[in-house]
Image (spheres, rainbow, N blue to C red):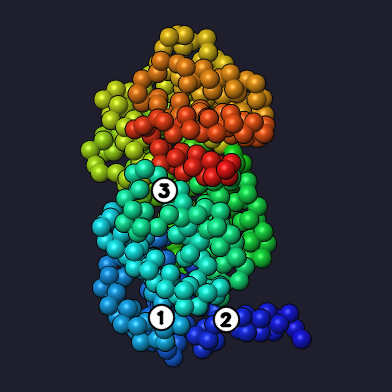
């Protein structure tokens, strides 16, 4: 028996009854590879209207997630009653889990469009459907992904989103959720690939373990030799572990895909622009970030892209060209994410006055650090150490940047010294986020050394800070770390 035939039999015999009816199992493969036109063509050939509408809805949702283009969300909302009517006609065994998937993704659509009341309503519907399905059909693998997602998200809710957990009346369980997602990635016959991508995102961002996420993506990438989504996620993970050159090698090789067949991902240019920015390659950063803001229709990360465009021009000694981007950011509504809040705050300052030499040098050092070019970052910081007065507010940032470089280079005593110096410095309110993160990273050092009590104290100290940049992300990390130390 051939390997392909064996794989086909294993897939079909492990699937619930409603999946056995599908005429072509390539629909989900096309979805995973972002060949959405091909997926749509096959979905339309499905003999069961409920299955057909389920996948047609997902195709439009994937297009929206990739582009944030409102025409796709409009399409979803226009056809929503048709999707729901068709799925409602399926047997109960199929209906509840498909509804849970659909309602969950509709909640994300509404959340990204900042329709929080609607997002909450659809999230509640999704939660109720998957709970009902799991109660009626316990231990079925197709429910694990949604159960795991709710457990993870609601097990570590940042304070600004605590209302969502309260409305759902559910307290999640991080560890249980991670196990459920892991199992879903191995066993679920329904959109299994999503569980893998969810896990890698959670590991990279919420658990602050991008190395684990990277290993997961590399293993998946070995199985899927040509997958633009996996390439994007892998490049993003490489940038998180400061392997900028490896990320650039992937991002510059977009041409290996048939771009006529795969859904365009504007965020690819955003990521490529950031990678060039981290290298302080201002010309290429400007080129790719400009493509992103031209092609991208949504708000998510647009503010951050404008800010990096303005900074790349300013650092390139063209503040006159960068200033309009700062003014634009200062006057428009941002996407509501951590990076956007920081970018808007700084843009308001820089729209009024060109950042001085000290500020520009600190930005250059930060860029080099973010790209993993530690010797270059350290060279700038050492020079700044002689130029910045001991009582200057910018000492907070200087100390923090020193600490991050030394920490990443494994020079822990120096890192601890500078983290403490950042916490103890008299920086302005805008530097509060650096103090909070310094406390968190001291917790990470203590945890790695097996000093559990000290680690807990540092994480709790980080959680005491209020109203600072990147707060939601840090709270997730601290709560996840504390959960692991119980």
- On the image, numbered disc 1 is attached to which residue? 95
Q: Residues within 10 Å of mark 2 (few under 14, many from 20)?
A: some
Q: Which mark is residue 185?
A: none
Gap in angstroms between the C-alphas marked 1 and 3: 29 Å
Q: How many marks?
A: 3
From this viewpoint, which residue is outermost toward the right?
1
From this viewpoint, which residue is outermost toward the left?
331
- On the image, numbered disc 3 is attached to which residue? 157
Q: Residues within 10 Å of mark 1 (few under 14, many from 20)?
A: many
Percent across and percent down for residue 125 are 34, 68
Q: Residues within 10 Å of mark 3 (few under 14, many from 20)?
A: many
56 vs 476: above or below: below
Q: Earlier in the sequence, mark 3 or mark 2?
A: 2
Q: Judging from the image, what secondary structure is the residue with disc 1 in?
A: helix
Gap in angstroms between the C-alphas marked 3 and 2: 33 Å
Gap in angstroms between the C-alphas marked 1 and 2: 15 Å
- Residue appearing at x 46%, y 51% in the figure: 155
Q: Earlier in the sequence, mark 1 or mark 3?
A: 1
- On the image, numbered disc 2 is attached to which residue? 15
Percent across and percent down for residue 145 are 51, 66
């Amino acid at each position: 028996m051939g390997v392909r035939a064996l794989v086909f039999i294993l897939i079909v015999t492990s699937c619930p009854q409603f999946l056995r009816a599908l005429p072509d199992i390539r629909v989900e493969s096309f979805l995973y590879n972002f060949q959405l036109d091909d997926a749509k063509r096959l979905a339309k050939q499905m003999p069961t209207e409920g299955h057909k509408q389920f996948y047609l809805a997902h195709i439009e949702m994937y297009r929206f997630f990739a582009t944030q283009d409102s025409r796709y969300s409009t399409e979803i909302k226009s056809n929503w009653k048709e999707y729901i009517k068709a799925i409602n006609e399926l047997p109960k065994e199929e209906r509840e889990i498909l509804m849970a998937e659909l309602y969950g993704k509709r909640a994300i659509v509404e959340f990204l469009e900042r329709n929080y009341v609607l997002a909450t309503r659809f999230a509640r519907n999704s939660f109720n459907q998957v709970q009902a399905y799991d109660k009626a059909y316990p231990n079925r693998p197709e429910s694990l992904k949604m159960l795991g997602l709710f457990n993870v998200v609601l097990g570590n809710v940042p304070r600004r989103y605590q209302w969502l957990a309260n409305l759902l009346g559910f307290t999640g369980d991080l560890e249980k959720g991670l196990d459920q997602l892991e199992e879903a990635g191995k066993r679920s016959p329904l959109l299994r690939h999503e569980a893998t991508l969810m896990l890698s995102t959670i590991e990279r961002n919420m658990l602050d373990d991008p190395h684990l996420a990277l290993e997961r993506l590399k293993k998946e990438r070995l199985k899927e030799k040509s997958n633009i989504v996996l390439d994007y996620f892998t490049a993003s993970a490489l940038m998180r572990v400061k392997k900028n050159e490896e990320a650039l090698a992937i991002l510059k090789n977009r041409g290996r895909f048939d771009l006529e067949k795969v859904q365009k991902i504007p965020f690819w240019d955003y990521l490529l622009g950031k990678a060039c920015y981290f290298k302080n390659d201002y010309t290429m950063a400007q080129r790719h970030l400009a493509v992103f803001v031209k092609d991208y229709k949504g708000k998510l990360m647009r503010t951050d892209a404008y800010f990096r465009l303005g900074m790349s021009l300013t650092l390139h000694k063209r503040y006159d060209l960068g200033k309009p981007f700062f003014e634009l950011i200062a006057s428009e509504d941002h996407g509501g994410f951590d990076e956007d809040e920081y970018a808007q705050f700084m843009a308001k300052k820089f729209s009024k006055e060109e950042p001085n030499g000290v500020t520009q040098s600190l930005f250059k050092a930060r860029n080099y650090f973010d790209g993993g070019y530690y010797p270059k970052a350290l060279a700038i910081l050492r020079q700044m150490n002689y130029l910045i007065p001991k009582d200057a507010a910018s000492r907070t940032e200087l100390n923090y940047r020193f600490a991050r470089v030394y920490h990443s280079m494994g020079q822990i005593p120096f890192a601890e010294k500078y983290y403490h110096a950042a916490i103890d410095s008299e920086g302005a309110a805008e530097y509060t986020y650096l103090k909070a993160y310094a406390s968190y990273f001291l917790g990470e050092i203590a945890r790695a050394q097996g000093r559990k009590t000290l680690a807990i104290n540092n994480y709790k100290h980080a959680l005491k800070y209020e109203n600072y940049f990147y707060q939601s992300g840090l709270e997730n990390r601290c709560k996840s770390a504390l959960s692991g130390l119980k």
